[in-house]
Image (cartoon, helix red, strand yellow):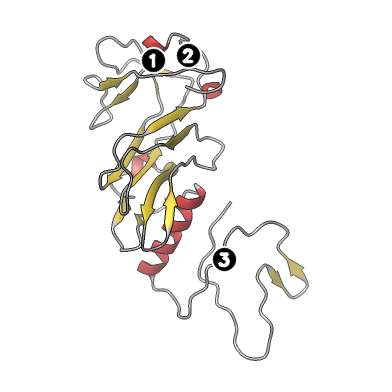
Amino acid sequence: NSIATGTALGTGAATDYIGYAWNSYFDGYITEVIAFSDALDATERTRVESYLAIKYGMTLDQTAPQNYTDGQNNIIWDGTANSAYAMDITGIGIDTCTGLNHLQSKSVNSSAIIDISNASTLDGGDFVVFGSNGGSTIDRSTNTPIGYDERIERIWSADITGTPGTVDLCFDRNALPGLNPDPNKIAVLTSASSDFSAAAAFNSVTITASTV
């Protein structure tokens, strides 16, 4: 899974092909092709790549922190501020400028365990974009608020743009071995930092055979 940009089509009498060059060809699927009449500058390319990354649940290369921007160049994911949470970046949002209407998302990466959906007031210009620190979902941390003995080591950070309201988070239960089967003893902890000793707990939880 990858996003490729910057390919220029030729001019003149020659025939241009996508996914084919001389005696070799791309053996796979191309999900979407976007063509422009002029070469894009760096800012425009970021907007296009962000649109594709959000739409298809793909994480842009964060070797050097990279922002995600909407069609009006507003930052919807701050790559520098969230550099510790550069894994499995994905999100939901509506962007009237690009026609993006993405209401449910899960990163295509095999390490991703969260599906996000059902934003209560999602409208044009609203986004929820998040990524993780790649921490273990098996090992436990005791950095928790009173009333909770342990949490998984994986932490997610979210950038919220506009007023998307509340959302539903669905976790892959198979990635959470040893999970207490009592929904009254499970919660999502939220904190303004990576210190969860005074975190707020949201424990409206439903458990099925495969999800939490």
Q: Which corner quadrant of the image does residue 182 belong to?
A: top left
Q: CA distance from mark 3 to mark 2?
A: 42 Å
Label 1 – label 2 distance at C-alpha: 8 Å
Count neighbours of disc 2 (C-alpha within 10 A) and say few if under 14, some if 14 to 19, many if 20 or more. some
The reply to whether residue 206 is visible in this rendering is yes
Label 1 with label 2: CB-CB less than 8 Å:
yes
Relative to 152, 27 lies left or right: right
Q: Residue at x 25, y 28 (%)?
A: 191
Query: What's the mark number on residue 33?
Result: 3
Q: Residue at x 35, y 62 (%)?
A: 71
Q: Can residue 61 be seen here?
A: no
**Residue positioned 29% across, 38% down in the render:** 165
The percent coordinates of residue 108 (x first, y second) are: 54, 43
Q: Nearer the viewer, residue 154 or 33?
A: 33
| Label 1 environment density (alpha carbons within 10 Å; few <14, some 14–19, many ≥20) | many
Name the residue at the right extreme.
23
Q: Going 53% across and 58% down the picture, which residue do you hit?
A: 3
Q: Badge 2 is on which residue? A: 179
Q: Nearer the viewer, mark 3 or mark 2?
A: 3
The amino acid on which the numbered mark 2 sits, given as a three-letter code, is Leu
Q: Which residue is mark 1?
A: 186
Report x, y in % for residue 17. 67, 74
**How far apart are the two marked residues, 3 and 1, measured between alpha carbons?**
43 Å
Depth check: 78 or 170 in front?
Answer: 170
On residue 68, the disc is none
What crowding class fits label 3: few (fewer than 14 Cα within 10 Å), some (14-19), or many (20 or more)? few
Indicate the amino acid at tag 3: Val
